[in-house]
Image (cartoon, rainbow, N blue to C red):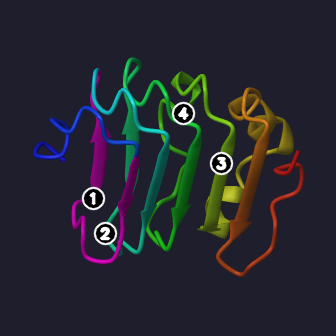
Amino acid sequence: MQSLKSLQHLLILSIGVGAYGGSHLYFQDGWFQKLKELDIGSSDELREIIIDKGTLSSLKKLQLYGLPKLKNIPTGIQHLEKLEVLHIRSMQVEYLQHKSPEDWNWIMEHVPLVEISTSDGNIVPNSRR
């Protein structure tokens, strides 16, 4: 990610099969200020995504898919004030069992369209708007 952060005018970023092998993906303050769409997927090792305040400030669409070890919604997602669409596909069922619909609504209250599906293909109740 260090090498990509210098691409200040990047609008769309897709991190797919084999592109990232780390367990944590950390978006630091000031990174990707003009990015509108971010897709992260097909990583067998990614466990956590952290978003600092002041990064991804123009992001409108975030898609996460094929991340079997991701056990949580990205930390700091509340900093994405312009986010309009969030799709998370194949979220681990064991994480979802510990969250109530109210928790999802609190976390996603500023995102107009949220769709979260479990690893068995079920849509999480109250995740759509």
Q: Are marks 3 and 4 in contact (CB under 8 Å)?
A: yes
The residue at which mark 4 appears reads as 77
Residue 100 point in image, percent of width and height:
81, 44
The residue at which mark 3 appears reads as 86
Taking the image as shown, residue 91 lies to the left or right of residue 97, namely left
Q: Are marks 2 and 1 in contact (CB under 8 Å)?
A: yes
Residue 123 point in image, percent of width and height:
81, 66
Give the class, few, some or many, for how many residues have Cα within 10 Å of label 1's Cα (few <14, many ≥20).
some
Q: Residue at x 32, y 41 (%)?
A: 10
Foreground mark, 2 or 3, reads 3
Residue in front for this viewpoint, 97 or 116 = 116
Query: Could you say which quadrant of the image residue 42 lies in?
Result: bottom left
Looking at marks 3 and 4 on the same chain, the residue that comes earlier in the sequence is marked by: 4
Label 4 element class: helix
How far apart are labels 3 and 4 at the CA level? 10 Å
Give the class, few, some or many, for how many residues have Cα within 10 Å of label 2's Cα (few <14, many ≥20).
some
Dot 4 amino acid type: Ile
The residue at which mark 1 appears reads as 23
Q: Residue at x 19, y 47 (%)?
A: 1
Dot 1 amino acid type: Ser
Looking at marks 1 and 3 on the same chain, the residue that comes earlier in the sequence is marked by: 1
How far apart are labels 2 and 3 at the CA level? 21 Å
**Which label sits on residue 45?**
2
How far apart are labels 2 and 4 at the CA level? 20 Å
Q: Residue at x 12, y 42 (%)?
A: 2
